[in-house]
Image: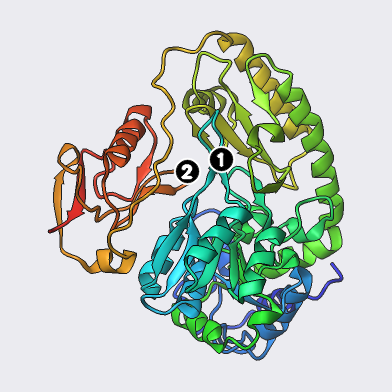
Amino acid sequence: MTAKTPICSALLDYDREKCLRLHMPGHAGGLGFDFPGFKEIGRFDVTEVFPFDNLQMPSGIIEESRHLLAQAFGAYESFFLVNGATSGIHTLFLSMINPGEKVLVPRNAHKSFFGGMVISGCEPVYIPCQVSEDFGLALSVSADDVALLLRENPNIKAIFLTSPTYYGTVLDIKAVAAETRMLNVPLIVDEAHGGHFSFHEEYPASALSCGADAAVNGLHKTLPVFNQGACLHIGEALKDKSRIFSSYTLLTTTSPSYPILASIEWARAFMEERGHGLMEQALVLSHEYKFKINQIKGLKCGNKFLRAKGVAGYDPLKVVVFCDGLNIDGYELAQILRNEFQIQVEMSEPGLILAMMSLFHTRDDWEYFYQSLVCIAQKYYGEKKQSEPLVFMPFPEVILTPREAFFAKKKRIRLEESRGLISAEMIAAYPPGIPCLLPGELISDEVYDYMCYLKMTGAKIIGPEDGNLDFIYVIEQ
């Protein structure tokens, strides 16, 4: 590899020196590991001794690598995140919003948004989601809705959006940015699933290139990066926001993982040198096999099923397969793929499965996935067993801010007793982890019915202490 990799190079040099490591971490360069693979990783798991720079006050190899990262992603400045995209979202909430100030946020947001609202003390104003009527998927928010809410709430201090969504739909960031620029309102994008967009012109354009003021990439989701590896990018409009760096250092670990840092750097260099070719290959395979899967009787696959107002593009590496023509649901389809074909998909819902293809999946991988679907569809094609009607996620009624609810007194009651009370817990089906209820929101009849629907479908529920959702915490009144 000819691209510069100062962190990786320093790690390799240190490993070759064979130093007696009288410093943290306690595994002493991997000596303390007997588990397969751990010893090798341990050789490169160092601490901030010479020459390994300091993530909180970078001045050497990390600082050099930060500039290379910003150049590759078209940012004014970039920051390494070693505890996931979540830490970048929290950093931006803390740095951009003061307690009591209003922020526009979409409902189809990751749970990290709630954490950011608790940390900042802001008051959320929710943007309605454009939802697929056939499948109940929250796919986008529209620039028209953003413009309307900005007019109705002239004191909005920032806008946080999610693009791409978990299903791969990409928002019309350019149209939203046109609205926010006129009012000088910062536009922040959770682009966790779009870290690869910057490296090929036929994929959706990156949020920064479309006018966003800041974006967060969960690089481990789509690039060859270890879990938790992510980055925060800011545009030139935010170059004087010193509070961003202060918030970043406040929320970032003082013991960063150098294997994660090195994997982010290596992925950046790799994508600069080989990313375009691999993305081109993946694009060709995506078009070919989505078309083939769409011809399987009982299944549907393709971007046209995920169109909605405000959707400007689609990530070709997200493969959503709708199974409404089979007599099994998405959960059962995923289970059959795992148990009988040794294929683990990213997630499943009652009417679909989501497969995330990477740049490193070969034609053989695509073909095996396709042939497995053919076998399953042949066996289970037919009228679906009777199921409950689709229930759409209701729009929330905010009574308390997330921070107020977080610190309020709470009590535990049975779910059936919760109607009309204020929730003290987050309730979300995972994946994709979009809350139907957040602390501080009213448990209306519609919200109660939706939670019962989640229980009935067998969705994995995250957030509440009781994962079965027989009990729920509410605010004491």
Front one among 283 and 130: 130
Task: Pinpoint residue 359: horizontal percent, then vertical percent.
Answer: 75, 48
- From this view, report whether residue 312 is shown above or below residue 245: above
Q: Residue at x 53, y 71 (%)?
A: 158
Looking at the image, is mark 2 or mark 1 earlier in the sequence? 1
Q: Residue at x 80, y 76 (%)?
A: 4
Residue 213 appears in view: no
- Contact between labelled residues 1 and 2, with CB atoms less than 8 Å apart: yes
Q: Is residue 274 visible?
A: yes
Please tell me which residue is depicted at 74% across the width and 30% down the height of the picture. 290
List the single residue furthest toward the front.
151
Q: Nearer the viewer, mark 2 or mark 1?
A: 2
Name the residue that disc number 2 marks: 431
Q: Please name the residue that numbered disc 1 is placed on.
A: 346
**Amino acid at circle 1:** Glu
Please count the marks in the image: 2
Position of residue 414 measured from the top left corner of the image (x, y, whole percent) = 15, 41
Please tell me whether residue 469 is drawn above or below residue 341 in the rendered image.
below
- Disc 2, SS: loop
Up-down: is 456 above or below 362? above
Q: In the rendered image, which quarter contains the N terminus?
A: bottom right
Residue 317 occupies which quadrant of the picture? Answer: top right
> Which amino acid type is marked by label 2?
Pro
